[in-house]
Amino acid sequence: MKKKSSKIIICIMVFFTFFTTSNGYSQDGKEAPQYQGLQLKVNDNWKLNFSGQINAYYVYTAQKEDKENGVEKEGFHSIQNGINQATIAFNPVYSMENGMTVSGTFDLAFGLTNHGVDSSAPAVTGFGYSSVDIRQAFIKVSTLEAGSFLIGKTFGGFGLDALLHDVSVLGIGANYSYDNPQNTTLAGIGYGYIFADKIAQINYTTPTIFNGTSRLTVGVYEPFATSDFNGSFGDAFGVTDNPNGLGYQGKFVFNKSFKKLNVYVSSSFISQEVSDNQQDLDLNGFGVDAFLKMDYGGFALSGYYYTADGIGDAGIMFGPVITVDSVVKTIKTDGYYGQLTYTLPTYPVTLGMHYGASRVKDKITDNGLAYSDSATRFTNSVSYAINANLVLKTEYTIQGRHKVFAPEANVFSLGGYFLF
């Protein structure tokens, strides 16, 4: 039965790939369609932006055998979201005569199933309700000469570019909870970068500097409690109290076009106290990253690297400490990815290839800590833009074992997303 299912999946993937590469643009020689959101102009001062997306995929996950960790070889079928849930965002903007603008963003996310996002919750049941998450709610005040201020809940800067430019940001990438699908997947979280979580924050961004090519953002945020996977402050997989002080973050962005070549570079940092249930151990977490993307013609080459101490390797403050000889120590992590995409010149087809890896220094040795095995991910993707709003997408990912989130597996997905 499993062999028959595998053959059917392979046939579907071959057909889909053939279909996407044998359909051209209706208007030859023009660029690929670009998505634009909806906008309602109320008057000269007020306008309302309205946007969102819905995505859904058939996913087959072939879990590999891992006798050492008690994992059996097994296949799982599911219908689920990608890393993004369905979202809808409202963005009212008020423009003043002096050039200042005030905008608010209210962003909701909806899951396909009633499972929720907690893997310990029961499986999908009848008469259930899909989860709804207020992902973002923030105010932004922008001026022409003084820069902009932001206050509210939105994504942090550390790791954000790695996520946004990941070929799987509207796809599946690495999967987890195979037999009980969540309303999200991992993409490359824990396989090359840390999730840029939704954070309560206050930020200031400078006006453009260096001839309009760059911006600098600095800010503070409400810090995260420690998800204590190793039980250094109590029960394993417990959660500590929130730190007393604020966290700090910053980001620098450079973006410039050189004739046909566009270069985008960013670097960010994050810093906060490691909460330890008020044991006063004076532990701190710090992470820094760098992202580069170059676009030339239909090619886009991206690279990312991060290093962190006392932050975690998947979520911010997920397992950032470990006890060695009765002493609590912060865990060092680092990760990277390389990605290449190519959009065909006469067809609305984009091919993508992505390799990422994360490693954690949490293996206890006689001399302290050493790196354990890396969590790796290799993704191939094909997407076909029917128009600027509707995109069909298929991916095939080979993911290595992540010690906390998922065993080793091969993941095939087929579906798409609709932007509005």
Image (tube, rainbow, N blue to C red):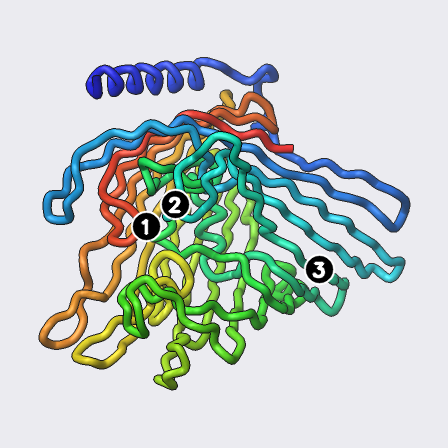
C-alpha separation, residue under disc 2 versus residue under disc 3: 29 Å
| Three-letter amino acid code of the residue under disc 2 | Leu
| Amino acid of disc 1 | Tyr
Quadrant placement of the N terminus:
top left
- Reading the image, the residue beneath label 1 is 191
Mark 3 lies on residue: 139
- The picture places residue 367, in percent across and down from the top left corner, at 12, 77
* Mark 1–mark 2 CB contact (< 8 Å): yes
Question: Alpha-carbon neighbours of circle 2 within 10 Å: few (<14), some, or many (≥20)?
Answer: many
> Which residue is depicted at the point 40% across and 75% down?
274
User: Which is nearer the N-term, disc 2 or disc 3?
Assistant: 3
Residue 171: quarter of image:
top left
**Total number of numbered labels?**
3
Mark yes or no: residue 296 visible.
no
Give the residue number, with chain letter if any, for mark 2.
186
- Amino acid residing under circle 3: Ile
- Neighbor class of circle 3 (other Cα within 10 Å; few <14, some 14-19, many 20+) is some
Badge 2 marks a residue whose secondary structure is loop
Q: Could you say where residue 286 lies in the image, as x and y percent from the top left?
A: 40, 72
Residue 116, above or below 391: below
